[in-house]
Amino acid sequence: MKNKYVVLFLLLWCVVGQAFDRAAEAEARRLLGVYQKDSEKLYNNGSLKAWAYNTNITDHNREVMEEASLITRQFQERWYNKVKTYLKADLAPSTSRLMKMAFTAQLDEDDSKNLTSILSTMSTIYSTGTVCLTPEQLRPHYLQYIELVNKKARLNGYSDYGHELRMKYETETFEEDILRLYKELDPLYRLMHAYVRKKLRQVYPQIEARGRLPACVLGDMWGRFWTNVYSQVAPFPDQPDIDVTDALIEQNYTVEQMFRMGDEFFTSMGLEPLKDTFWNRSMLKRPEDGRDVVCHPTAWDFYDGKDFRIKMCTEVNFENLGTIHHELGHIQYFMQYSHLPLTYRDGANDGFHEAIGELMSMSMSTPQHLEKMNLLQEVPESLVTTLPFHLVNDLWRWRAFRGQYHLQEYNTRYWQLKEQYLGVEAPVARSPEDLDPPAIFHIANNYDMIRYFTRTILQFQFLEKLCEAAGHEGPLHTCDFYGSKEAGDLLAKMLSLGSSVPWQDALEVMTGERRMSSRALLHYFAPLQEWLTEDNLRDRDGTEEEEQEQEQEQEQEQESSARRWSDSGVVLALCVILARWL
């Protein structure tokens, strides 16, 4: 008899429990619907205020933007308190995922005001600073920033802010996965570094025959992109140059015509055209009225499903034409997922957004496409195109967030990592009082940079499948999927998912794979790797002693490399060498 009552109790408990779960699910869904509607208006207003500041840097616009940011924080805090019970409820997996993406714990008002002020201050210093040193530096602001973002991350259950950023990729093995990819790409980077060092020594004899390169000789203030030294280091020296800047100028291209060309690239594939609001509201050129603006090219989503803009101080040249196609890739992504709830209006992960932009820029740069656009008269028989690898600084940030560095060694550790992984060194003596990382836009403006690592891997995986859909035959680096509706349909299918599913699911829709793979990238650059290997062999004098010395050095480098790969962090050491066809 007792057992009978026990069974009845368990059955009743299960029924009540299931009823409570269904009730919690229904209420969570109702709350999400209300939140999504209210948040669209709020985020639209915040974006408008941020746009006003970025296109006209004044104290007034900064104050208005910061006020809007605080209103957003208060809104998020109210909603978090309203739904936090349901964050722990037994909901459907999709509902639970959406709840956790939408609602996070917030800093208190004082800390939030301080963080907002710090971020806008760093953005202002970065955007209005000059080469000459000014009394106000980024260092004290960035140190306060680290403290506050770590505090907020811990409120949401993360060990530090770096942990929070990595978990945006929804996989516990993210660092290990990136480390695996980095090891696969390292041999190509070593070949490129050795080749560039050899070529630059012809210009700067003081550079050592072996070892690190001074960062200042690599083409920009950060030693980040190597495109500006292209003319000094270009392989395949007999190949014609395809920088079509002269053709653009000779054909009287305007900035708007360059954007129209980019728009037609997407519509040729059956994708969405730019809306009237884009042409009426974007800042496509530097204003002529003397106001300060943030010129760094960015694409903007105003969260109303119809207002998408680009902010860019465009000039008529080949480099900017590539940037236009990149930024329009972001705009296309915005438009494709604009039907989703606001929380899902984002890339499947940060690397997806960047991969789409860079993929479009890369495809536009092929001689085949430039000939179709009447910007190149004949297609050279080239073997390689752009190598758009970005210097990633997140290893330093992850360690700083984790508290692995003492305050006085922040900058020293930064340059040690650059020397170890990138083979570059500071051009002038640095001191513990310096802090060089925030001199990079993405660090000063709170963008993670691991997205550019994943971007580089993903863009070639995407390229491979789009080229298959377009029926391309021949080497991967000669593919141009312009005009292919089949490629456009495949791309739209993935873009329209936004972040509504884990990125592995989105990747599978596009490529049939669930892991990031370097296979397509290495296939794309196989001709370059073969050429660089042969070029290095041609430089040897053939003596047995020198070959033995080189073999010993290679073994030592491999051993050192193996030790490096065991580190818990990751940094991308692949930088741009080739930014145009040869």
Image: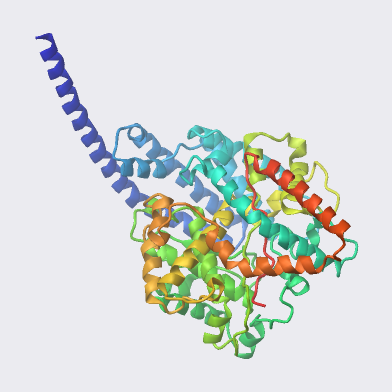
Q: Image height check: is 130 above or below 393?
A: below
The residue sitting at the top extreme is 2
Residue 471 picture location, percent across and down: 42, 76
**Residue 546 or residue 291, whichever sits in front:** 546
What residue is drawn where x is 65% and y is 71%?
579
What residue is drawn where x is 54% and y is 68%?
326
Residue 414 picture location, percent across and down: 73, 45
| Residue 130 seen in the current view | no
| Residue 526 seen in the current view | yes
The residue sitting at the left extreme is 1
Q: Quadrant of the N terminus?
A: top left
The residue sitting at the right extreme is 206
Colour basis: rainbow
**Residue 198 or residue 293, whichever sits in front:** 198
Quadrant of the rendered structure where residue 96 is? top left
Residue 185 picture location, percent across and down: 63, 56
Residue 236 picture location, percent across and down: 71, 76
Q: Is residue 417 left or right of residue 152?
A: right
Q: Quadrant of the C terminus?
A: bottom right
What residue is drawn where x is 68% and y is 34%?
404
Quadrant of the rendered structure where residue 530 is? bottom right
